[in-house]
Amino acid sequence: MTNGTANDFGADFEGRVAWVVGASGALGGATARGLARRGATVVLSGRNADTLAALAGEIGGGAEALPIDIGSDPSVRAAADSIAAKHGRIDYLVNSSSVSVFGDFLSLTDEDWLAVFNAKHLGYVRTLRATIPHMIAARFGRIVNVSGRGGQHPSRIHLPGGSANAAVDLLTKGLSKIYAEHNIRINAVSPGPIRSPRLDAMQGAGRPAKGPVLGDGQPDDVADAVLYLLSERSRFITGAALQVDGGGPGLG
């Protein structure tokens, strides 16, 4: 749907403010483009300032780059507060961060595991903790956390990321129950293999040859799912982890 018409979600996104964390990656970038195309004001955060600036220029429509250190709670809180101060609210939060740490279990160090959890699980904790109070004040919020198929189906070369993804899915479900009374819906999207530089890195690390039955996906496949869960078409869905994985590997 991100390649479709601007009104395929009606007026759901028009005039809304969306914070996309991890926008310098393939999935976050595709989501940001889809939101902007449908009338949302998009704030782009991530590690790569040059990539964010280029994406903001491409998107136009008031999109702005706001680099953050997702490993720093003060950096994340300052970013959320600045968005709320400038725009009056934060309607949507999309978390789409990742760290490409792959390898054999016995070769991975504590530092490898900590790097993944600090950027993925704790990074999401920080953005959620900084954003949810603004949503409570507005009595409106829609959040999507991009986790990953490895959280339900372990990969021998991706156990740190899979463990972090499982933690993200649990966090999503728990928070969805806590904050539903404030009109805040929180869901996850769990992608399988998506064509991107990250997938190339997995291939180089020894990704198993058997891919999804529908083949590898595209970033827009994930963005479509994220936009659906942010939209009011999914008004009766919260705490879910939507699998966008091409059906998973075929039968051996």
Image (tube, rainbow, N blue to C red):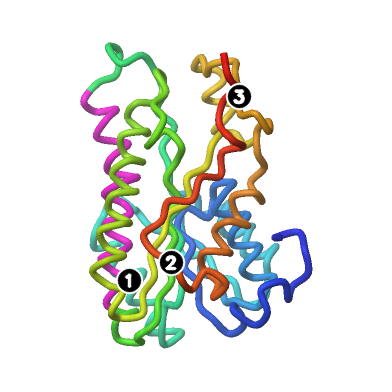
- State if disc 3 and disc 1 touch (CB < 8 Å): no
- The earlier-in-sequence mark between 1 and 3 is 1
* Distance (Cα) linking label 1 and label 2: 8 Å
Residue 230: x and y in percent read 51, 68
Relative to 139, 245 lies left or right: right
- Residue at 44%, 65% in the rendered image: 237
Relative to 243, 172 lies left or right: left
Q: Which residue type does callout 3 highlight? A: Gly
The part of the image, by quadrant, that contains residue 133 is bottom left
Quarter of the image that includes the N terminus: bottom right
Relative to 178, 52 lies left or right: right
Q: Which residue is mark 3?
A: 211
Tag 1: Cα neighbours inside 10 Å, few (<14), some, or many (≥20)?
A: many
The part of the image, by quadrant, that contains residue 12 is bottom right
Residues 163 and 76: in front is: 163
Residue 98: x and y in percent read 43, 42
Residue 226: x and y in percent read 54, 59
* 121 falls in the magenta region: yes
* 2 falls in the magenta region: no
Q: What residue span does the magenta drawing correspond to? A: 110-133
In the rendered image, the vertical position of residue 159 relative to residue 58, given as above or below: above
The part of the image, by quadrant, that contains residue 74 is bottom left
- The earlier-in-sequence mark between 3 and 2 is 2
- State if disc 2 and disc 1 touch (CB < 8 Å): yes
SS of the residue under disc 2: strand
SS of the residue under disc 1: helix
Q: Which residue type does callout 2 highlight? A: Leu
In the rendered image, the vertical position of residue 26 relative to residue 216, given as above or below: below
In the rendered image, the vertical position of residue 11 relative to residue 228, given as above or below: below
SS of the residue under disc 3: loop
Q: Which residue is mark 2?
A: 93
